[in-house]
Amino acid sequence: MFGVFKKALGGRPPAVETGSLAGRVAAAGLTLDSTLRPAPLFKSYPALRGTKLSDRYREYFFAAKKHGLAEVEQLVPFVNVPPAATRAETFTAQADDAAGAQALLAAFPPATWGYYLPLSKDFGTLGRKDAMPPGFRLSQRRSDYRLNFIWQGIEAMLGGSIAGSSVADIACNWGGFSIEAHLRGASSVLGFDIRPENIAKAGRVARHFGAGSIDFRVQDLFTHEVRETHDIVLNLGLMYHISMPWEMMKKTYDMTHGIAVFDTVVHRESFSGFILGTGEAAVGHAATAIGVELHPTYRGLIDMAYMVGFKDVVELHGIPDPAWPDFDKEPYGNKTRRCIVAFK
Ligand SMILES: C[S@@+](CC[C@H](N)C(=O)[O-])C[C@H]1O[C@@H](n2cnc3c(N)ncnc32)[C@H](O)[C@@H]1O
């Protein structure tokens, strides 16, 4: 019955021949028109291009860019946060605990982390600091950069310190942002993630930092029952992995009585909307039953924050680190990833 549409969507063979569908439609006295009219840019759409939506989107985006329709916009005030790429290295209490760091790495080897936290003078979550392969060095740089500009920016907006604040870290993964919150003086920290293996790592690394009071839990944001609210709610690196952005933002809004921080991939088209992400990468990352991601445009992110009830939105800009020559090709450098702070 829907074979013709399946064909349009992915070039898969129709489940029912168009002819028989046309026959049934004709029997009902109507006609089925099978003339597809893709936009000129996609004249080979759909079958010859396969099913990769990202390829089609790329073509569309470059055409839009060529016509000046994809300029980087600035729609809300922003705070410039200077680089302090070694901020994470100031966790010095464990500097001499090489044995503790190695024990942790024996339980959770470098390849299981993806993110960097220093564990001692010589070791980090990505292994021996002086022996990290280039890919791990880049991960270190990215982790340090984000941990610094997001936390330093939040602190600046709250008058210079988060001491005494209650913090919730949604989709906390390796727990780095939760641990930083604890070390910067948060009165309580709740970190949760849908994946048990992430929570196991977060709990282990928190113990290494003497931050065992952090409440790490396995929890799906969408089934999280909001029984308490927090001064600061972090929603970092999650929005582009899920298929229910509105529900995600509403739940985050409900969880805070102060601010919420959203850090996400954004698209540059100057309308409020979402781009459909699917395919293998999405299935691997999305952590949803359906393996589909909805990626917001920059406007979509900001408008949705206002629509859900936040009163003000301010952006955090990390000032490029001069020691990072390819920063302009990085997601934060080319503004395909942005971080906003929403005030309730
Ligand atoms: C890209 S990581 C971001 C980690 C961390 N927040 C950061 O910004 O560095 C995305 C995380 O979202 C988690 N996640 C995905 N869907 C979730 C959900 N519905 N509820 C809670 N966590 C979820 C994944 O397990 C993963 O750890």
Image (spheres, grey):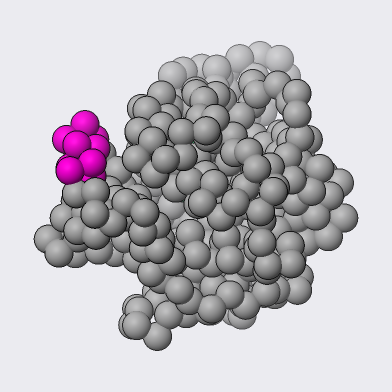
- Could you say where residue 317 lies in the image, as x and y percent from the top left? 59, 72
Percent x, y for residue 300? 71, 55
Q: Position of residue 137 (x, y in %)?
A: 25, 63
Residue in view at x 56 percent, y 49 percent: 181
Residue at 66% over, 61% down: 161
Q: Which residues are magenta?
A: 99-110
Image height check: is 279 above or below 79?
A: above
Q: Specify whether residue 104 is painted magenta.
A: yes
Residue lying furthest bottom? 322
Q: Is residue 248 above or below residue 226?
A: below
Q: Main secondary structure of the magenta part?
A: helix
Q: Is residue 89 left or right of residue 237?
A: left
Foreground residue among 225 and 228 = 228
The answer to whether residue 247 is seen in the rendering is: yes
Magenta stretch containing residue 106, yes or no? yes
- 202 or 210, nearer to the observer: 210
Towards the viewer: 250 or 281: 250
Q: Is residue 211 left or right of residue 102?
A: right
Q: Quadrant of the N terminus?
A: top right
Q: Residue at x 19, y 64 (%)?
A: 134
**In the displayed structure, would residue 53 be above or below residue 226?**
below
Residue 338 in view of the camera: no
